[in-house]
Amino acid sequence: MLSNVVHSQISLHQRFRGVVPELASRSHTERILPIVSQALADAKLAPADLTAIAVTHRPGMVGCLLVGLAAAKALAWRFNRPLVGVDHVQAHVHTGLLVDPGMPLPALCLVASGGHTALYKLIEPGKSERLGTTRDDAAGEAFDKGAALLGLSYPGGPSIENEGKLGDRTAFKLPRTMLDKGSLDFSFSGMKTALLYTVQPPSKQPPGKQRQEKPKPEELPSGQELKNLAASYQEAIVDVLVGKLRRAAEQHDVQSLCIGGGVAKNIRLRERIANDSVLQDLHLVLPPLDLCADNGAMIAGLGSILFGQGKTSPIDLDAVATAQSGGKIKMRPRKPRRVSK
């Protein structure tokens, strides 16, 4: 890995407590060329030195994906380089191989972010099987909504983690939704509702009125109560993630465990995985924090694997908002390049 440049949009979206698609795509348009230039400069390379151009084409906000695709196609066309489309969820799944190329396979992979929470079995490079996914909110979305209920800033994961450092994780009893026995799917919507009921109990509601979706400023917790709520809520989410990982490790023959996505940066989650009696027997790959959230290196990493397998994408590759239903990556075989004499 020669360079990995990331431009964060957190400050842009913070006052909206979530990502605004129009603002995000506009920021992508403004920043993508300077970022590509910086990445090349950091790597001490010229565009002509590149072998191929990898780009995210699914899943995500279509406006943002189209900006990246336009830039990648322009580079591929201008410098006569192959284009390799990458599913960004699959890139998270393969981050373990980027960090530890010798990671024993098959591997159990958790992808947990604001838009996705799913378990995958990485069978071999470029081939994975989805074992379970979320039925409602993703883990990162649950953190964001929980932070809003507690009056904390966006993004919710880091805010709740920071506020809960000095809190009592057992102070409040919140549900852990594990679904059916043996299920590897996730559900976090009930946890968010339970937090709302804890902050704004029925006894405080006027008769005949519906519960507020967001507590009023005077109802927000503060002091040690806020710290305890943040710690308890975080522990509930981590309990479910670790519980599902343990369940998957017991059901499937895997040798390694790797994690990816913004939620994978959570320190408490990493501690629980490392100390779990079942999971600690696996070969653990906990990537550096800068490789957990969305980044260019993981796209290049999977793109390199696919290109090495002879897979490229057509120049008319389109953006797709949704993820693939399974883990198999379908691409056309790479045609031999013509060499001019």
Image: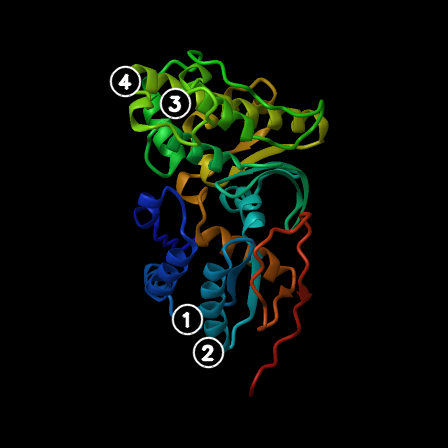
- Closer to the eye: label 1 or 3: 3
In three-dimensional space, the C-alpha distance between marks 2 and 3, rounded to whole angstroms, equals 51 Å
Q: Which residue is mark 4?
A: 223
Residue 119, compared with residue 313, is above or below; it is above
In three-dimensional space, the C-alpha distance between marks 4 and 3, rounded to whole angstroms, equals 11 Å
- Closer to the eye: label 1 or 2: 2
Which residue is located at x 47 percent, y 70 percent?
Answer: 70
Relative image position of residue 183 (x, y in whole percent): 69, 28
Q: Which residue is mark 1?
A: 47
In three-dimensional space, the C-alpha distance between marks 1 and 3, rounded to whole angstroms, equals 47 Å
Q: Which residue is mark 2?
A: 78
The amino acid type found where label 4 is placed reads: Gly
The amino acid type found where label 3 is placed reads: Ala
Q: Earlier in the sequence, mark 1 or mark 2?
A: 1
Q: Nearer the viewer, residue 296 or 139?
A: 139
To which quarter of the image does residue 318 belong?
bottom right
Question: Which label belongs to residue 230?
Answer: 3
Q: Earlier in the sequence, mark 4 or mark 3?
A: 4
Q: Are marks 2 and 3 in contact (CB under 8 Å)?
A: no
Relative image position of residue 311 (x, y in whole percent): 64, 63
To which quarter of the image does residue 131 belong?
top right
